[in-house]
Amino acid sequence: MSEFDIALHRALKLLQSTDAVEVQETPPHGESVDLTIAIATYDDFDGAYFTIHSILTHHREVLDRVEFVLLDNFPEGLPAPILESFAKYIPRFRYIPFTDVRSTAVRDILFRKATGKYVLVLDSHVILAPGSLASLLAHFDADPDTDDLIQGPMLSQDSSHIAATHMEPRWKRGMFGAWGVDPRAKENPEVPFEIDMQGLGSFACRRGAWPGLNAHFTGFGGEEGYIHEKFRINGGKVICLPNFRWLHRFERPSGVPYRINWPDRIHNYLLGWQEIGWDVESIHRQFSMFLEGSYPSIRRQAELSVQKPELAFGGILVLSDDRRIAPWRSCLGEAESIELAIHRMLPADETPDMWRVTSAFVSGIDKAILLGWKSVVFLTEDTVLDGALAYKLRNIADDLASGVDSAVIHSGGDDHASYALIVREMAYRRLRDQLSEMIAGTEISEFGLPAWLLAEDAVDIELNQPLALARTALSTDETSMSAESIATVGVVVVNLDADIDRWHSSWRTFNQLRNLAEVVRLSASEDRANPDVGFAASWRRAIALAAEKEWGSVLVTADDVDLLDVSSSILESARTELEHSSWDVVQLGHDAKSRSGSLLDGSSLIRTASQNRGGHAVLVHSRAFERILDSIPDPNSDVEGYTTWAGRYHTIGDFLVDGNVAGTLTCCSLSPGIATNRDLLRAGAVEADYSRRFTLGH
């Protein structure tokens, strides 16, 4: 069923009624239970109905020990009020409409809404065999503090025999896991045994032992094997309980109503397997064979999606006072243009004006708690979202000490008029509860969220420049002045005469950058015995050329360099930051042995150049031209001197590290590195974290 067919199916269902569907979350029942039976459903009323009512009919002997949690992932659908009505006649039943996540990761929400010591998660079209629930509870009673994942055999479609006790950990037709039957389930049905993995139509564990799904999973698929390994990593096992039997309905005559596609599944496999340390190359081998010619484009799409810098956070939330719609529309448009996922947080109804942004902040904390985010970023609606923003935020978050629970990011002298906030999981409940109490009853005349957070021991991060432009501050004059102040940057591309095609490709690549004076070609000085020595000679000639042209700075680069997809935005922001720093050299990439230093004070993109030997793309300030030319002998006029220099330094990177250590050059590194090449990526350079976000066009 295509995505168009799915959308059409959904629209037709909605058109069946002229009345808006209105449902509410059922409040907690307040009773103590042993087991939560948790079900997530999406436009599957029949499945949910028969799963729940089969339990009511065939498992009455344990109903006094259970509660039901039904998460409706399609609460705008016509059946929603009927599902909601189950709470009127089923004891300890909770109906939860939920749309913040529509993916396999919605299972995490079930665990956060559950109150039982143990949680049984069922697909909304699974029937439990008689005695299954009693067997499961007996197992938990015998081992109350277990860290194991408990699963059982899946029955055949006529329920006459076991179809699968487990999945074998191998690929089959684009899915990791192949059904298998272990004879022990039939020979000794009272004796549990360990398995590698099983389908997730039915599984149970102690609520406190649930390790969680990756919050950035999208769509459906990819969790089998991954979640089983997470239990093992946490010290548990995966157990087949032979008498815990279940029947799964696979048929969908009307089609699956939600999105299922290969990019989502591969995204989840890549993200999950990277998290648990499994070999992602086996994913590529499998899908290269299974999807054949269509896989390269799908692979690139999936790899781009798992290399987004914002994945360092749970989410990026935009605080809104709900009085203006235009700023949010601008934010949304900007975010879509750079493929940045953001969410708008609104204040509670009838919140006084002074508290509206704070109320939206509290709502955002609630969202982060529910979705299980380890950290969250808050921005204001007046923040202009550009390609560099997520990288800046990631840099700042990476530099925060482990014990820091919150931070306020602002530029000096702006009196917190424009700010961003980072809040970590350890501070969620404390900040939410304190602010909720203040909103409800504190009598004060004015309140500022950033100032209050700083008073509550948030880290104060003061930048030399705003983290991002404020929408209200944008003007043609300011943009022109900024462009004029940095227009004397030139680019010199070192190119072998025999590789003129690489020069043409480089010329196109670097002309995508804005506000450059010129991009020029320099014939490379060849040294077949030692290419690094030849490049160093060319590098010196490039500095001499820049001095002759009287450029304010020069970017010297090899002709095989590829740029990060948002290089222009990052480089412009970095150059603005550099106006407030004393620097001679900024390395725009790294070699495989480079180590990143800490961010410079007041910077969000520039780090100290701690042992960075990357010399393939280097920005040099004119103040250092003469010093560099004096330090590197001219290979044409002083052959012996240059030979001695090359014997000492070997590469330009070695020269820069030595100059930085000696204090003769002030070297910095751009973070993230925006320039690399395929050899460096293969060697494991720092930029490999974003390997698919480079323009691999050479």
Image (cartoon, rainbow, N blue to C red):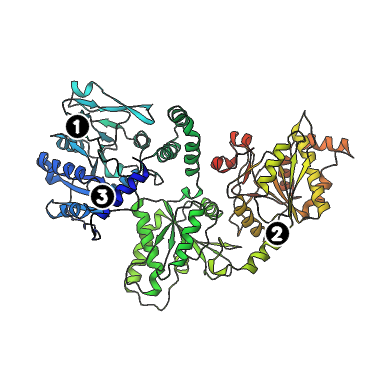
Label 3 element class:
strand
- Residue that badge 2 annotates: 486
Give the quarter of the image for residue 415.
bottom right
Residue type beneath disc 1: Arg
- Residue that badge 1 annotates: 245
* Coordinates of residue 94 in the picture (x, y in percent): 20, 53
Answer with mark 2 or mark 1, whichever residue precedes in sequence: 1
* Coordinates of residue 211 in the picture (x, y in percent): 34, 42
Query: Looking at the image, is 652 positioned above or below residue 27?
Result: above
* Coordinates of residue 593 in the picture (x, y in percent): 63, 38
Answer with mark 1 or mark 3, whichever residue precedes in sequence: 3
Q: Is residue 410 left or right of residue 286?
A: right
Q: Is residue 404 visible?
A: yes
Label 2 element class:
loop
Label 1 element class:
loop
Please identify the quadrant where the C terminus is shown: top right
Q: Work out how far the residue at label 1 is from the one at label 3, CA to CA, in angstroms.
A: 23 Å
Residue type beneath disc 3: Leu
- Residue that badge 3 annotates: 71
